[in-house]
Image (spheres, rainbow, N blue to C red):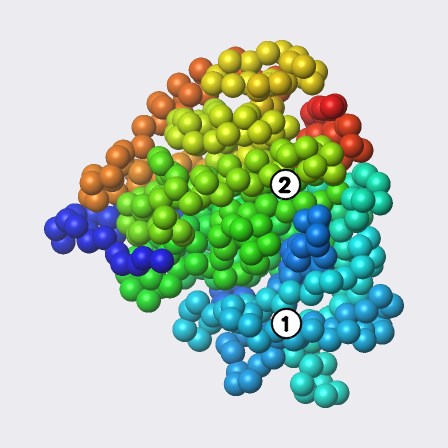
Amino acid sequence: MRGGYVWNRTRARVGVVLLVCILLALGHTRANAVRTNKRHSHTTTLSTSSTSPGGGPSLVRLAFAGSDEVGQPTGVSVSWSTGPKPKDLKSVVLLGTEQGNLTLRVESTAPGSQVTYLAGGTTHHHVEVTGLEPDTTYYYRCGDDSSGDDSSMLSEEHSFRTAPDVRAGAKGFTVAVWGDMGAGNCSQKTREMMQALSPSVDFAWHLGDIAYQDDWLFLDFAYEKVLDEYMASMEFFSATRAYMTLAGNHECDCHSIRCILDSELRNSLHNFTAYNARYRMPSKESGGIMNMWYSFNYGPVHFVNLDSETDYYGAAEGEHDEFYLLDSGHFNPYPNAYMEWLEEDLKQANSVANRTLRPWVIAGTHRPMYLYGNASSMREAVEDLLIKYDVDLFLGGHIHSYFRTYPAKAGEAVKDYSPEARAGKLVNIITGTPGAIDRPMRGGGVLARAGDWVASVLSKAGRAAYERVVPWLTGGPRHDPRRDAEALEDDMSIVAHHTHEQSFGMLHILNDSAIRWELVSSETGESIDRLELTK
């Protein structure tokens, strides 16, 4: 990965950048990072000191791992975080099929099993546990077991259930799906509803913009604090079922004042470094790259995870971040590697043998193909491929709203979801409404709502200035908000349902021939929108 900071204007212009950053930082010091939501009995406040884990394991997260002869997961990767790495720290998972009887020990010493990307910072551990029995509950602890009776270096005991064997017959399952969540009170209602519904969820799929650690922009360095606190708040999901992730634009780098001024922070956190260090997605099993693009199978579904940020023509962060400050992209030096991987993956998934085993192919990414100003690049890159290989559903985020389209291609839609009408077209769903720090929060007291409104106005004003001044300084194109408005107006003709209500998605795979999409209210848990697709 390439690094380096782009200083290509005079010191005077650099001074303007710093001034704008200060204004933006003040605008982003928002009320919902420090206030108590009146609807809850606790406060979700970012601490003023680092929340990086201490000596013992924390921030435990799982993802699918391994692959058997028909391409289904045979286990999980177990990831966790510890404080600054002591000498000879081990990465170990203890597990078994009986609670409290963890007789299987797996230790990883492979390259990448311990990753530290900031000097003196948190160490992130990854251990693959594969070859497990399908559809079986395993109990586990992770950490370092070399200290004998001292269990402080091991996590508490968690459990997970392995993926079912599709050859034993299609088994229904449910996936929680969302993009654009963020830390803090803005997404608290969503987290609480997710936790209440979590017993019915088999795994989670986060479509990018995970914690918004780059966008708090305190004068203090908050990047790692926000990431740690977000991940800790989601352990109810991530420690007990696979938490599959995609990269969004807010995973790219850190552009707070501290990062801009500190060369070590700039270079250590650019080009999706923290995102790729903290998670371990099954790219090795699927021929993908890091956590940027990959695929996996679960039951009668092939899930394709697309990179909307880099490595295709017109990618928003293919050469540099959105502010033209830091280099990004080029995860494969061969220019067409990503697109060739995507076509080969879709081609294999669409073969007669694989469609017989897994009739459904569902694709997800961060940026959608419609309904915002720069969507055309993503659409031109992948829409024809997805339709060519009969992808059944395309899920995205990025826009902090919810849209469900009719089956569409090239901006033309049919108002019919039957299998015949969907042929040669694609259903798009954008689910970016679980929280996000620049999305005002409904509910709470008058002062809370007023604080949200003021923070939102300041944030948008500061960001608008930033998006105009920085391109002027660095030679990049200026963002024109009119493009977003025009794209939204043009694309609304293909939209079947639209809402701003705080919510998240539940994808129910019913059987080989039917799936149901449901948008769930974060406030009530009731269904806001529903769609059933059949074969």
Q: Position of residue 91 (x, y in %)?
A: 62, 75
Relative horizontal placement of residue 335, taking residue 351 as reference (left or right)? left
- For label 1, the crowd category at 10 Å Cα-Cα, with few meaning under 14, some 14 to 19 and many 20 or more, is many
- On the image, numbered disc 1 is attached to which residue? 57
Q: Nearer the viewer, residue 423 or 173?
A: 423
Q: Amino acid at mark 1?
A: Pro
Q: From this viewpoint, is residue 22 visible?
A: no
Name the residue beneath numbered marker 2: 303
Is residue 175 positioned above or below 95 on the image?
A: above
Q: Residue at x 12, y 51 (%)?
A: 10
Q: What SS does tag 2 mark?
A: strand
**Res 275 label:** none
Of the two numbered discs 1 and 2 in the rendering, the one whose residue sits closer to the viewer: 2
x, y (%) of residue 476?
24, 39
Kind of residue sitting beneath label 2: Phe
Residue in the picture at 64% in, 65% down: 128
Distance (Cα) linking label 1 and label 2 = 30 Å
Q: Residue at x 81, y 75 (%)?
A: 103
Q: In terms of depth relative to the viewer, which is nearer, 84 or 292?
A: 292
**Quadrant the C terminus occupies:** top right
Asked if the residue at tag 2 contacts the one at tag 1, i.e. Cβ–Cβ closer than 8 Å, the answer is no
